[in-house]
Each structure stands twice: as structure tokens, then as C-alpha cells.
Image (cartoon, rainbow, N blue to C red):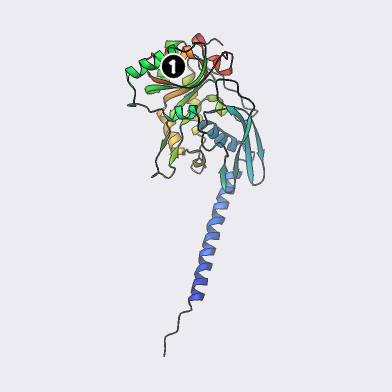
Amino acid sequence: MEPREIDWLHAVRSLAKVVGVSVLLFLALNVAERLVVLHVDLDGERTARVYGTAAQVVNPDKRFHGADLDEGLIRTVYTLRGEPRTAAPARGETAYTVTESLPGVEAPGLAEPERSALTEAVRAVEGEGGSGSPKDKQELGEALDRLPPALTAVAVVEFAWPLTAEKLVALNRRHGLCGDESVSYVYSRHHYDDSDTVPLSNAVVWNRDMAWVLPWDEPAEYRCETEPEAALAAFRTWTGLLREGDDLAVFGLTRDELVDAAREGVAYGFVADRWRLADLRKLLDDPDVRTVRVADLAFGLGTGPGAGIRPGGAR
């Protein structure tokens, strides 16, 4: 009796059916999981509080003003309105959307900060053991001294070593500074590792105002010299909202890194928004400050929203 010849076409078709059914089952399970995540909070507030805040955290180059929330049956759209963070008044606002739907989270224009002098200054923050020398500080101080002290600046102040909230309060008191919307703390630095599951890790830049994501939220009541303590407490509260399944990778973030940063509770520097150049120059002489990277300058704008940081907290 001769052996029966294998019907290869039939075998391939059978295998294709098995693979097809497996793929459909996998997709169905993922869709079911996404539906559960999407509809745990039917009013969409969690989309705003998690992803709306995350969008602000990784985009320090923008000032955000106001937001809208639109929840549908299969997707939630959170809209932020923002402008470039420049020393001069920005011209007009841009609407940015964060959409959570069955496929995941999309945030065009917000997933990664645009390349700018401020973005590069934030990415350059090194932390303890970074580059820089007393001679570098002296040369930078001499360069700043040649500029009009009344100029308004957007800059990044980098610390010589990570500072706890307690040490930040001491820094404020030494220089008579008062925290408000013009100070955003760098709690985690930018890095890139192509061997990681999320290769890009954006810097985490935090201000308490970032938690004010819905019209009925209470705006932050800043605490002047002790604002670093309130800011860290608010950051820890926000990271406490995060869940394992949150799709933070679209923003170059992971829950674990954010939770770790909150637990460590140190700042590597801060973004100074519309500060007087003279105040930045004074900080350069402090031993806790490694350098000041000026991203933008403008004349005669000391009454801008960021001008609230003044010696003694005067506005």
C-alpha cells in the first residue's frame, strides 16, 4: 500500500485558519481590556487627570491655558490650549488634543516636546557629577553681567546636585524667592536607551498648576518660600493615580519611573518662566547652582505672569 501524498494546500489553509482565529481572539481580548479601562470612569475625568497632566509634564516648552473634555461611547477627547513658552508675549494659542480610545492614547504635537532652546536646556540637565567648573560659572556670570539686568528671561536653572524639597525651601529663603506658576521643578531627567522597552524617557517637569485640568478644579494656591514642599506633595498625589495599564509610553514616560521620581523627591533644576535676568544672575553665585541656561530673552516684560518670582515674593 503506497503512502498517501500530503495535501500541502489543505495543510496551509488549515494553519492559516488557526492563526487567524488566534489573532482574532487576541484582538478581542485587547479590545475587551481597553473597554474596561475606558469605562471604569464614565465621565472621562481620569483621562484628563492622567493623560492631560502627563502631556503638560513632558512639554515644558508650552504654557497651557484652559481645557475641554468631550466623552463619547468609544473615545474620550481632552483638549488643551497652549502657547510657546517664550519671554515675549506669545501670539495666539494652539489647540492640542489627547484622545483615549480602543487602540490606545494619541496626542499629536504633545507626545514629545518640540525642539527649541528651552527643550534643549531641559534635556541638558545632568544631575550630580555633571560637567561644569568654577571657571565656567565665572565666565557665564561675566557674560550675563554684560546684558541689561532688567531683561526678562526664560531659563533652566540646573543644580550642582539633586536638592530635596527642604533644601529648595532653604534656597528660596536665602534669595528671597517665592514659588508660583513661573517655577517648574525637574524631578526626572531626559535620557534615551534603545535597549529599553520605552527607549525615550522625557524629562519630568512639574508645577502644581498642571494638576488643574478641569474647569471645576480649584487652582493652585502657591505657598511662596515653601512651595517646593507643596509641589512635591502634589506630584506624589498625581503619581498615586497611575495604574499599571496606563498608556504613558506615548509621552515617553513609564509609571515605574514616575513613581520612583516621586518617592526620591529630589529636583535636578527648575524652569524659570519670565524671570528678571538680574535674579537669575544672583542665583548663579549660589553653591547649590551649577549653571543657568538662558533659552529666551525679551525687553520690558516684567509684568508677565512669570514675573511673580521676585525677591521677597513681590509681584
Residue nearer the viewer, 288 or 167: 288
Q: Residue at x 42, y 11 (%)?
A: 174
For the image, the number of numbered tags is 1
Q: Is residue 145 left or right of residue 17?
A: left
Query: What amino acid is labelled 1 in the image?
Result: Val
Coordinates of residue 122 in the picture (x, y in percent): 45, 28
What residue lies at 58% left-to-right and 16% top-to-bottom?
A: 304
Q: Is residue 152 visible?
A: yes
**Is residue 287 something one can see in this rendering?**
no
Residue at numbered disc 1: 169
Residue 298 horizontal/vertical position (percent): 54, 17
Label 1 CA crowd tier, 10 Å (few <14, some 14–19, many 20+): many
User: Where residue 163 appears, x then y in whole percent?
Assistant: 39, 22
Residue 305 found in image quarter = top right
Q: Quadrant of residue 109?
A: top right
Q: Nearer the viewer, residue 274 or 179?
A: 274
Q: Circle 1 — which element?
A: helix
| Location of the N terminus (image quadrant) | bottom left
Name the residue at 46% across, 29% down: 120
Q: What percent of the width, then of the height, locates residue 162? A: 38, 24
